[in-house]
Image: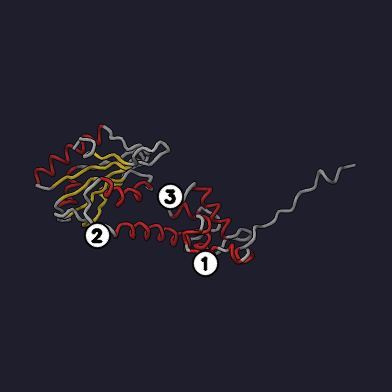
């Protein structure tokens, strides 16, 4: 006789929807009562999504998103197409989420409109977090006026996953077009290691010679990497390293 217990399967129960949670556990109510800082990353995403998908709450959708990408920073690096691969995220929500992360980057940049960018730390604070999110190598110039205040940040080149190609003439063309008195060259290493390569050293020397010929101050060259558990710096400064 077949054992009925051997074929018994526990019924699959759907996660509770947000409206089914106790009032004090709902993300919106928690935010209103205690402030946004008291919400977890999952709860922030759930509040943004509003709804999940059939059988999956917005909280579980936020949890799935974080599990897939590993962190909020990695979510912010995701393309719209990658977000659309998530079951429950359509074009509207993917576009809105990408806009939220871009909005945060621009808010962070605004504080430098009237503050001198006179140190590698300040330059990294301006462009580093956004460049750490890139999966391709990007070369950018931070254009400054005579008081080392921000004019704008221009991208010179976006390369492949492993390398970029930026010529001194392309870099200086951006500097002159922006009427900058000084500039900082910045590029990222998607591998995470900010140590300069032989090509980085060569380009820096060539840009320095061209900038001197044009009478423009080449203040620094930063290579942006990614922080790790060893506590090492997330960037390398040619100025601080005595190479400029």
Q: Position of residue 1 (x, y in %)?
A: 90, 42
Q: Could you tell me which quadrant the C terminus lies in?
A: top left
Label 2: how many residues lie within 10 Å, few (<14), some (14-19) or many (20+)? few
On the image, the x and y values in percent for residue 65 come to 52, 52
Label 2 or label 3, whichever comes before in sequence order: 3
Q: Which residue is mark 3?
A: 73
Left or right: 240 in relation to 14 = left
Whether pointer 1 and pointer 2 mark residues with C-beta atoms closer than 8 Å, the reply is: no
Q: Residue 201 location in percent, x, y?
A: 22, 35
Element class at badge 1: helix
Q: Secondary structure at mark 2?
A: loop
Could you tell me residue 20's position as x and y percent?
Answer: 64, 65
Q: Are marks 1 and 3 in contact (CB under 8 Å)?
A: no
Q: Residue at x 25, y 53 (%)?
A: 154
Q: Which mark is residue 147?
A: none
Looking at this view, is 82 or 114 the one in front?
Answer: 114
Q: Label 1 belongs to which residue?
A: 33
Q: Is residue 37 above or below residue 170?
A: below
- What numbered label is drawn on residue 113? 2
Q: How far is disc 1 from disc 3 in space, using C-alphas?
A: 27 Å
Left or right of 88: which side holds 189? Answer: left
- Which residue occupies the extreme front position in the image? 34
Looking at marks 1 and 2 on the same chain, the residue that comes earlier in the sequence is marked by 1
Q: Provide the secondary structure element on which disc 3 rests.
A: helix
Pick the residue in front: 149 or 62.
149
């Amino acid at each position: 006789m077949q054992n009925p217990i051997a074929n018994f399967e526990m019924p699959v129960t759907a996660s509770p929807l947000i409206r089914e949670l106790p009032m004090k556990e709902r993300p919106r109510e928690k935010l209103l009562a205690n402030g946004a800082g008291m919400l977890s990353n999952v709860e922030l995403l759930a509040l943004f999504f509003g709804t999940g998908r059939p059988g999956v709450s917005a909280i579980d959708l936020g949890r799935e998103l974080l599990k897939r990408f590993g962190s909020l920073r990695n979510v912010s690096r995701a393309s719209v197409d990658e977000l659309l691969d998530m079951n429950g995220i359509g074009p509207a929500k993917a576009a809105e989420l990408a806009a939220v992360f871009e909005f945060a980057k621009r808010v962070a940049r605004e504080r430098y409109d009237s503050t001198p960018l006179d140190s590698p730390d300040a330059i990294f604070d301006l462009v580093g977090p956004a460049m750490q999110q890139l999966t391709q190598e990007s070369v950018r110039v931070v254009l400054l006026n005579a008081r080392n205040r921000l004019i704008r940040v221009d991208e010179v080149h976006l390369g492949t996953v492993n390398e970029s190609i930026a010529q001194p003439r392309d870099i200086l063309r951006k500097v002159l077009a922006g009427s900058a008195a000084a500039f900082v060259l910045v590029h990222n290493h998607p591998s995470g290691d900010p140590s300069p390569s032989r090509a980085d050293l060569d380009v820096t020397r060539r840009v320095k010679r061209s900038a001197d010929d044009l009478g423009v101050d080449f203040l620094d060259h930063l290579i942006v990497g990614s922080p790790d558990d060893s506590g090492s710096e997330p960037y390398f400064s040619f100025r601080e390293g005595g190479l400029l």
